[in-house]
Amino acid sequence: MPFRDLREFITWLEGRGQLRRIKVPVRRELEISEIVDRVVKGPVEQNVAVLFENVEGFRTPVLMNVFGSAERMAWALGVKELNDLSEKVAKLLDLSIPGGIIEKLKKLGQLLEVARAGPRRISSGPCQEVVETRRPSLSEIPILWCWPKDAGYYITFPLVITRDPLTGTRNVGTYRLQVYDEQTLGMHWHRHKGGAEHQREGELSGRGRLDVAIALGADPVTMYAGTAPLPPVMDELLFAGWLRGAGVELVKCVSVDLEVPAHAEIVLEGYVDLSERRIEGPFGDHTGYYSPPDEYPVFHLTALTRRRDPIYPSIIVGRPPQEDYWLGKATERLFLPIIRAVLPEVVDMNMPAEGVFHNLVIVSIRKRYPGQARKVMYGLWGLGLMMLTKTIIVVDEEVNVHDVKEVTWRATCNIDPARDLVVVEGPMDDLDHSGLRKNYGGKLGIDATAKGPLDGFTRPWPDEIRMSEEMIRRVTQRWKELGLG
Ligand SMILES: Cc1cc2nc3c(=O)[nH]c(=O)nc-3n(C[C@H](O)[C@H](O)[C@H](O)COP(=O)(O)O)c2cc1C
């Protein structure tokens, strides 16, 4: 059975020694960040989820680092290890009709799973045990001040829910929110994201407002789904339902025409006034730098609903690695089969933590024809949010893309910079600080594959050094005798 809500997941983690409760008082200003930064970057046995039960001035506990390791991320999504996610998606995408009746029934079962995964509306849910519509206020939520030069307190792990004003399609995105006052938040959806598109559709169709609901805490799959770069036509809640094997239960909001996960901890209902912009930031971001202040829309609170005893989930981002690296790893594993379906030569890919998702993608390919590494680069730069990737390194199929040392060795040996670098221009992430213009700049593709006749390379390509099998066996057998440890 999937986790019904965040607390079921907390109990599961605690049972496996993966959650610590901190009962001594801690400050929400910087102190929780410093503690969690050490926990997430520390030795594996110290890297646990942390529940701060005594945040100075608040009754509500703060949950941190819940997805901050490969193991917890996999458990959250109901698999043993993250690679299982690729297999799950690959099976779904395989639409060939299998031969035997058993295989046919299995395929039918998989398709039925999708059909049954749709979100389900229920009449009431724990996220509305307490409803505040008269004077809703954010003041009882222990929202963190993450880094010294931040512009203020930020909600960092929300599910921001909107509907396309024209088509009604839902979007769920994780976008940070700056607290301006008890009822007003800065809505930091980047211009390439689903929420921003709904805002533009609203503006173009002459509407004054866009309804927005913000869920804080939900079952772990739904929490992850807010961060998944799905195409606009795909509902994140349907995706979450398929991944968890049971539709997400929703309740109707009390003040806006939207639905929210019934098992959320806290829900903020309200709207974005489409004519309003305000300076948001700076904020210590996942690039490891402060993202500079800029104009973003503003969210106004019309109702706050919650559980009687809510838990407030938060996340810090900053110099990598941080918890968000594991959310990104899950995305990398889930989307690999989809990328392979479009670019079948792709064998594997890696987005190393230090590449902060959009700065570096390493991809291995099965090269069969001239120009194929370039074709893969152009293909990736045209695929959804992969458009924001600044650097793509393409290596041969036998290279382990997850071993950055191996990639550095082979790539730097294999490239002739005069021939193998591709520099193009295109859209850039809102967070990129290197370009002369915001949202537009250069991209680098590196063809680090071995060269041969396919590439018009006429010199002999050298063999890689490898010891003979016989000598490896002989020295292994004699190792003790040599006394070398
Ligand atoms: C912890 C965390 C914070 C994020 N903050 C933002 C943000 O402030 N603005 C933004 O546009 N994307 C942010 N993202 C990335 C989006 O969640 C991600 O691109 C997602 O695909 C957006 O959903 P959408 O494609 O439906 O817009 C964040 C991701 C994580 C994991």
Image: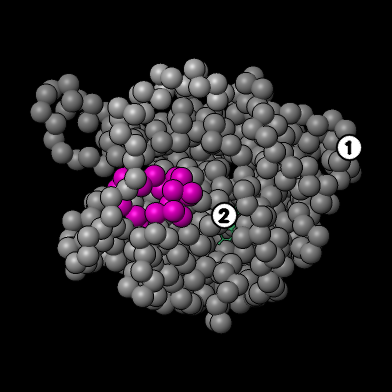
- Element marked by disc 2: helix
Q: Is residue 206 visible?
A: yes
**Which residue is pictured at 45% across the width and 65% down the height?**
391
Q: Measured along the vertical axis of the image, is residue 226 above or below residue 129?
A: below
Q: Does residue 399 belong to the magenta stretch?
A: yes
**Which residue is pictured at 29% across the width and 66% down the height?**
374
For discs 1 and 2, the disc positioned in front in the rendered view: 2
**Which residue is pictured at 61% across the width and 60% down the height?**
287
Q: Quadrant of ligand 1?
A: bottom right
What's the magenta region?
Answer: 394-410
Farthest residue in the left direction?
99
Amino acid type shown at disc 1: Pro
Does mark 2's beta carbon lie closer than 8 Å to ligand 1?
A: no
- Judge from the rendering whether residue 295 lies leftward or rightward of residue 194; answer left or right: right
Q: Tell me the quarter of the image containing the C terminus.
A: top right
- The first of marks 1 and 2 along the sequence is 1
Residue highlighted by disc 2: 354
**Which residue is pictured at 39% across the width and 33% down the height?**
84
Farthest residue in the bottom direction?
436
**Image location (x, y in percent) of residue 457:** 21, 67
Tag 1 and tag 2, C-beta contact below 8 Å = no
Q: Does residue 435 belong to the magenta stretch?
A: no
Q: Measured along the vertical axis of the image, is residue 405 above or below residue 80?
A: below
**Image location (x, y in percent) of residue 342:** 26, 55
Q: Is residue 273 visible?
A: no
Distance from disc 1 to disc 2, alpha carbons, whole Å, reads 33 Å
Amino acid type shown at disc 2: Glu
Residue highlighted by disc 1: 25
Frontmost residue, 25 versus 70: 70
